[in-house]
Image: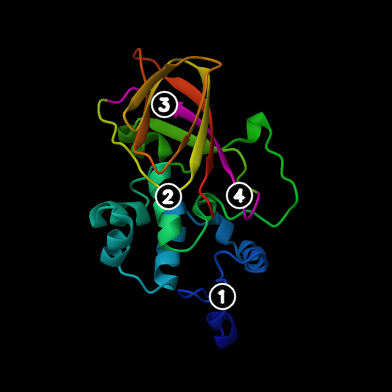
Amino acid sequence: MDEKKKKSRRTPGGTEDFLTHSSQLERAKADGREKESLGERIRKAREAHNLTIDELSARTGIDADILKHVEANIIIPPLGDLVKLGKALETRMGFFISPGVDKTMTLVRAHQRKSVSRHVGKSSARYGYLYESLAPEKANRLMEPFMITLTPAEEVEPSTHDGQEFLFVLEGQMMARVGDRTEHLGPGDAIYYDSSEPHFVKCVGGKETRILAVLYTGR
């Protein structure tokens, strides 16, 4: 990369970097970077900010060993951790999922939906959900819509991060805990909350639950 492009990278309080600037995203797509994995994008964003794994861990509160597995595509992080990584690396969380291209509109047909990663089915099981992005081709997304399948899980940890979340239950039953309040939801029920409150959702009844989720990270 030449010196002119290097200077365009974001530094604290500086200008936009190649991860967030739409014209650079077009170049990235042309270079084949849209084929990079989620872990590779996170690693390159970290290196672009001259951060070590331990430094990124300190910024996000995510264990360094987990971050190493994320960058190696062994673990797919939960959505809350992606929000934290995006804030720490001054990058939209959606870029890690898919950079997209600078279009006014994109369309995803039902048969075109794809999981975030080929590893998602195995590595996200311990988090109790699998997720599919519903707008992966739209760059600079202000909202992140997902189709989420909640799977029975014994261990679900609360998450806290910037932004807000909207959830609509399509199938099955789930429990949502936000702060000190617990609610049970079924098909047709919806919940909207501030993500800054400790929160988690999990399916109940021993069966999978499918929900439509929209995240707004405040960036």
State whether residue 200 is above or below residue 42.
above
Give yes or no for residue 46 being in the magenta stretch.
Answer: no
* Label 4 secondary element: loop
Residue 115 in view of the camera: no
Q: Quadrant of residue 40?
A: bottom left
Amino acid at the residue labelled 3: Leu
Side (left or right) of 208 relative to 171: left
Q: What residue sits right under mark 3 in the picture?
A: 150
Give yes or no for residue 145 being in the magenta stretch.
Answer: yes
Q: What residue sits right under mark 2 in the picture?
A: 82
Q: Give residue 61's position: percent from left, percent from top.
A: 28, 54
Disc 2 crowd, CA 10 A, few/some/many (<14, 14-19, 20+) = many
Amino acid at the residue labelled 1: Thr
Residue depth check, mark 2 versus mark 1: number of the one nearer the observer: 1
Q: Are marks 4 and 1 in contact (CB under 8 Å)?
A: no
* Foreground of the two, 25 or 170: 170
Residue 163 in view of the camera: yes
* Foreground of the two, 85 or 125: 85
Disc 3 crowd, CA 10 A, few/some/many (<14, 14-19, 20+) = many
First in sequence: mark 2 vs mark 1: 1
Q: What residue sits right under mark 1 in the picture?
A: 15
First in sequence: mark 1 vs mark 3: 1
Q: Which mark is residue 142?
A: 4
Amino acid at the residue labelled 2: Leu
- Look at 60% across and 49% down and name the residue there: 142
First in sequence: mark 4 vs mark 2: 2
* Label 3 secondary element: strand
Amino acid at the residue labelled 4: Leu
CA separation in Å, label 4 and label 2? 15 Å
CA separation in Å, label 3 and label 2? 18 Å
Residue depth check, mark 4 versus mark 2: number of the one nearer the observer: 4
CA separation in Å, label 4 and label 1? 19 Å
